[in-house]
Image: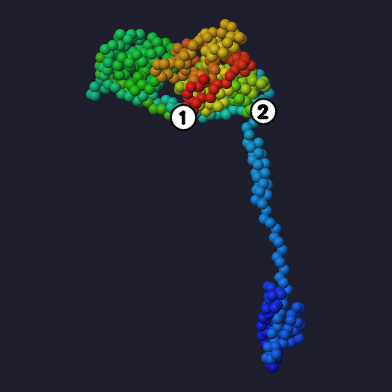
Amino acid sequence: MGDNGEVPDVHTEQSSAFEASRPGAALRKFRAGPGQPRLPGAHLRQPSAGPLRMVTVTMPRPLRPLPTRPPVPAWKVLLPLLVAGGVGWGAWQAAARPVNPPAQPGAQRISAAQDWQTLRTLGPRETGSAGNARTLDWAQAQFEALGYRVTRQALPERVPMPAQREGTVTLGGPGDPQTLTGEALLGVQTAEQTGTLVRLPPGVTDAQLEGLLGKLAVTTCPDGPWRDLTDRALNAGILGLVIVNDCPHPPAYSPLGNVALPVLSVTPGVGRALLAGVGREVTFTTTVRTSDAPAWNLIAARVEATPDVLFGAHLDSVPGSPGANDNASGILAVLHAARQAAGTPLADRAWFVLFGAEEQGLLGSRAFVRAHPLPLRGTRAMLNFDMVGVNAESLGVDAHPELLSLARSFRPDLRTFRDAPATTRETFGRSSPVTGRSDNLPFKLVGVRTAFLHRGEDRHYHRPTDTTLNPALAEDAATLAVQIARAALDAPWTPREPCGITGRDCR
């Protein structure tokens, strides 16, 4: 302490000896006051002269930090999260997994006759029509009542359907024109041609068509199908044709194949005025507009079922026809087969399909085959029903030889027919005679064994008069198909070899 009573600053210093003996000891500077207690462990030394005291303070050695807890391995953090996520995913998958609808009491006891009483009230089933949509909904409800899960496969492309088909005939020159109206035939494009009008007899021969190059023609009700006459007339060089529809029965639906010349029909009254103008210059005009309609395949199957056998029929009908035999009868047959299979082992090895847009060129069955190449490798039989409700002929089958052998084990006198693919110009649906244009064809082309059940072509085929059928005949066809299916599942069979990447050389 100084003379004035103040405590002088004291600076600590570390001796070399202390530094050697206590490495790392801290030296602190402090101000010593009167009566201040001595710090523990402090060594004081009084200098020989001077007012300052140098105090050396030895601080306790700092405690070594406690060891920290090692970091938790990442797997210990991630594992519970993964487990929880896996459990959640499994629960979600279980909840989202398709399930079979519960079978409804009495659904198996419904007959084809009862089905027909409802189906006939739903209206024509032209692609894109309200009747088509109602039939899809009704059929789905029938399958679900039997315990089958139903899915709808939308066709990848919308189907062009006729929305406007107008036709006109203009007689006379610019000063005194007379315009008559008619209707463009299905398959005709918008077109216009002018030329001299000639008359063709209903049963015109190829010889009579010679020398008519560049002419426009009119004829009354043809002796045969309208399409046949049209094809021959246009191939002879005629640039346009009017058919006077004075036929005793409505003409069959037989669309032309994208004809770029005016072909139309007119009423008998218009026809008389037109026939009076033979030899004059006329102009034929057709105005055609289409609208794109949606179409679906209806697929019914148990969730766990594989398509070892497939029952199919087309759901749609042609424009202008109620489509009773063609092909409400096929719908009834597929439903009856599904009822026979329900609750039996067959239900776990069968799919039931109602195809859309068959009448526009087998569009539904083609889309189905493209969408299911892997499941179809294991298909032992595709059984197709088309026009099985009217006995124009006895029940017949066009079948793979192995399936035909099985069919004849149940019905030795079963009629057979040959449904060969058409090799001439494009056709839509099936035309007369039967030319390989039903829904079994796309399956046959990829190597699936098929059986096409058919009762022949009745006189109401593709006409507005196709209004009746015999439900018992549809049930009979379905019963035979189920017998063939069960026999095919029991018989030895070698699966098809996979096709190459190009889809060719399938066997």
Q: Tell which of 267 and 221 is nearer to you.
A: 221
State the residue at coordinates (68%, 49%). 76
Q: Is residue 393 above or below residue 156?
A: above
Structure colour scheme: rainbow
Q: Residues within 10 Å of mark 1 (few under 14, many from 20)?
A: some
Taking the image as drawn, is residue 260 in sight?
A: yes
Tell me the residue that label 1 is attached to: 158
Residue, far top: 413
Locate the N terminus and report the quarter of the image it occupies: bottom right
Rendered image: mark on residue 472: none
Q: Residue at x 40, y 13 (%)?
A: 225
Give the amino acid at mark 2: Pro
Q: Is residue 128 left or right of residue 349?
A: left
Q: CA distance from mark 1 to mark 2?
A: 33 Å
As drawn, the residue found furthest toward the bottom would be 3
| Residue hosting label 2 | 102
Residue 140 lies, in percent from the top left, at: 58, 26
Tell me where residue 103 sits by quadrant: top right
Left or right: where does residue 29 sit relative to residue 365? right
Residue 36, horizontal then vertical, whole percent: 75, 84
Q: Amino acid at mark 1?
A: Arg
Foreground pick, 8 / 341: 8
Residue 178 left/right relative to 148: left
Residue 273 picture location, percent across and down:
31, 16
